[in-house]
Amino acid sequence: MLMKRYTGGVLAVLMLVAVFSIAAQAQLYNPDLDLPKPTGMEKALTKMGRGISNIAFGWAEIPMTFDKNLKKGKPLGYLVGVAPVLGGARALMRTGTGVFETVSFPFSDREVNYDAVLEPEFLF
């Protein structure tokens, strides 16, 4: 009887050790090493998508600039006078960058020119 209890206890401890060692192994994940590197075609399509997104949503920089400055606690005169001008300038930059990225995505150097020109990469 004592041998059955001892064997059952040893088996339970071994099972717990096995479960925790598997769980510890599952935590070892490095996406830089485990995920495949994107191909040139994937980078080019990402650049094209980023360009189309910037063309479509470049205008949204105006209300976003107003909202960011409102959250910073800027005075009303600044929000009404300066924020739309800054937002308009950022909208023109984002839309122009979108046109550039959409037109140039198939002709880019594979090592260099797939990085985002503006930060944040996507507006939303």
Image (spheres, rainbow, N blue to C red):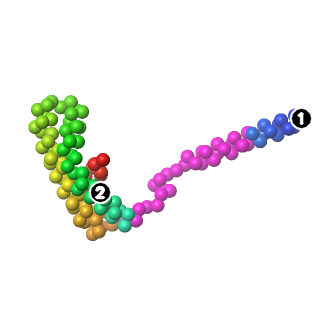
Question: What span is colored magenta in the figure?
Answer: 13-40
- Figure check: 13 above or below 90: above
**The furthest residue to the right:** 1
Q: Is residue 34 magenta?
A: yes
Give whichever of 74, 109 is nearer the camera.
74
In this picture, residue 107 sits left or right of residue 34: left
Left or right, residue 62 beside residue 12: left
Q: Residue at x 23, y 42 (%)?
A: 64
Is residue 119 visible in the rendered image? The answer is: yes
Judging by the rendered image, the residue that carries numbered circle 2 is 50
Q: Nearer the viewer, mark 1 or mark 2?
A: 2
What residue sits right under mark 1 in the picture? 1
Residue 110 on image: x %, y %: 33, 66
Quarter of the image that includes the N terminus: top right
Marks 1 and 2 in Cβ contact (< 8 Å): no
Does residue 120 appear anywhere in the picture? Answer: no
Q: Secondary structure at mark 2?
A: helix
Secondary structure beneath dot 1 equals loop
Callout 1: few (<14), some (14-19), or many (20+) C-alpha neighbours within 10 Å?
few
Where residue 42 sits in the image (x, y, percent)? 38, 63
Write the residue at 50% across / 56% down. 34
- What amino acid is labelled 2 in the image? Arg
Camera-side residue of 33 and 124: 124
So how many labels did they put on this image? 2
Q: Most extreme residue toward the bottom, as rendered?
A: 107
Whole-number angstrom distance, CA of label 1 to CA of label 2: 70 Å
Which residue lies at the image location 83% right of the left edge and 35% below the top edge? 5
Residue type at numbered disc 1: Met
Pointer 2 local density, CA inside 10 Å: few below 14, some 14–19, many at least 20: many
Q: Quadrant of residue 20?
A: top right
Q: Which percent across, then down, holds residue 30? A: 49, 51
Q: Main secondary structure of the magenta part?
A: helix
